[in-house]
């Protein structure tokens, strides 16, 4: 067991973990934060995207020991009580969610995109989000939602 | 016992984790544990291989805490890129954008934002996959690899770094510390070309070209080709052929024929057969030269 300390959605947390524990599994199975999803497990689908030090990374390919001392943000950290984040609200309003499985990953990647580039073009949105797969929406409404969130 | 090797939900193997903060202690760990150890940088290849039980290291050595292995710097006549620098950091580097546009173009084309945030240039090179997208631009730019081991540091041309599929010139306890890249000449034009199943996917073929013209004739041309031989390769015979010649359609046709000779099939081609690679690399070469020439003109203006 190793002792790891990192900031999770603004709160400093300490955990004793085995070195082979994945960040995704710590979130989902130990903390019951099931917003972040397990999709492919090999870095292709983006469903497990979380932000580490503000940058989108894949939590299914990240060891918990590797985020020691860093700042991790998940979908659970976005809304304040019942007040949704502007990105969540935009996804809701634009119907950018169908089955919803990919949505947390999309929203976390969108958050990083808009922080870096507050007014992205459609091409820039598609390029930035290409590591997130959606099998329902056909992406059109997702692009609309990102644009709407950027306007706010 | 039946083991489902496609289950990538968990990391099945147990290992001891090390996070050295100096090159010396990393090499000490490598010497101590030998083949039982694997270096962890971005993890986008290593952890997948471990999940699929292709490798089961007993010791994982995280090298991202070694400060000198991360970052892009300009020293005198070379640009040095730490081996544990993520593709995203390279992509955002003002030095790379201004002085190594070829590397910038290649790195930006890799995977997704998430992958580029994690994956490192050293990991891409040390895996020695023939299709590594950072290898071809670095080869065309005449880069060098600085290696550190129990006997100290040594520097070799990157071309001598790749020995075969998944095989590098690294000794058992050695590690790649940084790549050294000469900045691009003012009058040179470059182009990186790649083709894959999707824009997100690994390259089926990639190619990097550095071109300098003198009037209508080729002054200096450096070409690197990926995923068409057991390693990423430089096409010296094509380069020598083109030197001093104008780029007429006859010359280009002959250059493409020489290029085709370099395509040496592996036992098992993944993604595309040899015939596809031969035909496509010819077209890519033409596109690469055209783009490079346009960029030379643009730089002149």
Image (cartoon, grey):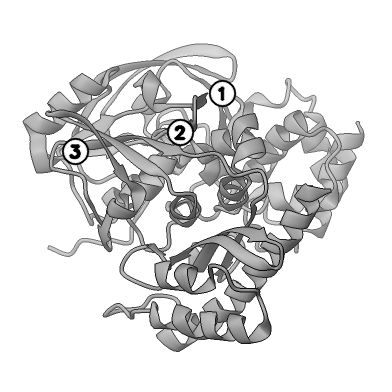
Vertical position of residue A101 compared to residue A117: above or below: below
Point out residue B213 in the picture as x, y percentages from the top left corner: 65, 60
Point out residue B9 in the picture as x, y percentages from the top left corner: 37, 49
Which secondary structure lies at badge 2?
A: strand
Find the residue positioned furthest to the top: A12
Which secondary structure lies at badge 3?
A: loop
Q: CA distance from mark 1 to mark 2?
A: 22 Å
Point out residue B224 in the picture as x, y percentages from the top left corner: 47, 62
How many C-alpha atoms fall within 10 Å of the one at disc 1: few (<14), some, or many (≥20)?
some
Which of pointers 3 and 1 indicates the residue nearer the eye?
A: 1
How many C-alpha atoms fall within 10 Å of the one at disc 3: few (<14), some, or many (≥20)?
some
Q: Are marks 3 and 2 on the same chain?
A: yes
Q: Are marks 3 and 1 on the same chain?
A: no
Vertical position of residue B154 compared to residue B50: above or below: above
Q: CA distance from mark 3 to mark 2?
A: 32 Å
Vertical position of residue A6 compared to residue B11: above or below: above
Which residue was labeled with disc 3? B14
Q: Are marks 3 and 2 in contact (CB under 8 Å)?
A: no
Q: The residue marked by circle 3 belongs to what chain? A: B
Which residue was labeled with disc 2? B81
Q: CA distance from mark 3 to mark 1?
A: 27 Å
- Residue at horizontal 62%, vertical 29%? A76
When asked about the image quadrant of residue B22, the answer is: top left
Which residue was labeled with disc 1? A53
Front residue of A96 and A118: A118
Which of pointers 3 and 2 indicates the residue nearer the eye?
A: 2
């Amino acid at each position: 067991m190793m002792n790891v300390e990192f900031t999770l959605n603004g709160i400093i947390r300490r955990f004793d973990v085995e070195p082979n524990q994945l960040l995704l599994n710590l979130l989902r199975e130990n903390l019951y934060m099931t917003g972040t999803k397990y999709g492919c497990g090999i870095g292709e689908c983006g469903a497990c995207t979380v932000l580490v030090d503000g940058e989108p990374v894949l939590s299914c390919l990240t060891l918990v020991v590797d985020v020691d001392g860093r700042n991790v943000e998940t979908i659970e950290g976005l809304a304040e009580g019942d007040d949704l984040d502007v990105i969540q609200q935009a996804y809701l309003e634009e119907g950018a969610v169908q089955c919803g499985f990919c949505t947390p990953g999309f929203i976390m990647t969108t958050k990083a995109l808009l922080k870096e580039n507050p007014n992205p073009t459609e091409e820039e949105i598609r390029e930035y989000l290409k590591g997130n797969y959606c099998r329902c929406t056909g992406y059109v409404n997702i692009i609309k939602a990102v644009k709407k969130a950027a306007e706010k | 016992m039946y083991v489902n090797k496609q289950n990538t939900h968990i990391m099945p193997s147990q290992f001891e984790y090390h996070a050295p903060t100096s090159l010396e202690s990393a090499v000490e760990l490598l010497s101590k544990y030998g083949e039982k150890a694997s270096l962890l940088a971005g993890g986008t290849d290593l952890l997948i291989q471990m999940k699929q039980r292709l490798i089961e290291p007993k010791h994982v050595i995280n090298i991202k805490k070694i400060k000198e292995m991360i970052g892009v710097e300009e020293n005198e006549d070379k640009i040095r890129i730490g081996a544990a620098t993520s593709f995203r950091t390279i992509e955002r580097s003002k030095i790379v954008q201004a002085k190594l546009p070829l590397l910038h173009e290649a790195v930006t084309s890799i995977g997704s934002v998430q992958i580029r945030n994690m994956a490192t240039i050293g990991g891409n090179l040390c895996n020695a996959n023939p299709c590594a997208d950072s290898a071809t631009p670095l080869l065309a730019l005449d880069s060098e690899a600085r290696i550190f081991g129990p006997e100290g540091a040594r520097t070799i041309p990157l071309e001598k770094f790749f020995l075969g599929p998944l095989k590098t010139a690294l000794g058992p306890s050695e590690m790649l510390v940084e790549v050294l890249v000469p900045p691009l000449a003012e009058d040179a034009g470059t182009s990186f070309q790649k083709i894959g199943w999707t824009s997100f996917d690994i390259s089926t073929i990639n190619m990097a070209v550095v071109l300098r013209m003198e009037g209508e004739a080729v002054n200096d041309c450096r070409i690197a080709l990926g995923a068409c031989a057991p390693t990423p390769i430089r096409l010296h015979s094509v380069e020598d052929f083109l030197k001093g010649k104008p780029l007429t359609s006859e010359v280009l046709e002959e250059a493409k024929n020489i290029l085709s000779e370099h395509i040496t099939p592996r036992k098992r081609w993944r993604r595309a057969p040899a015939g596809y690679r031969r035909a496509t690399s010819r077209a890519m070469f033409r596109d690469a030269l055209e783009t490079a020439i346009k960029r030379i003109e643009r730089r002149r203006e």
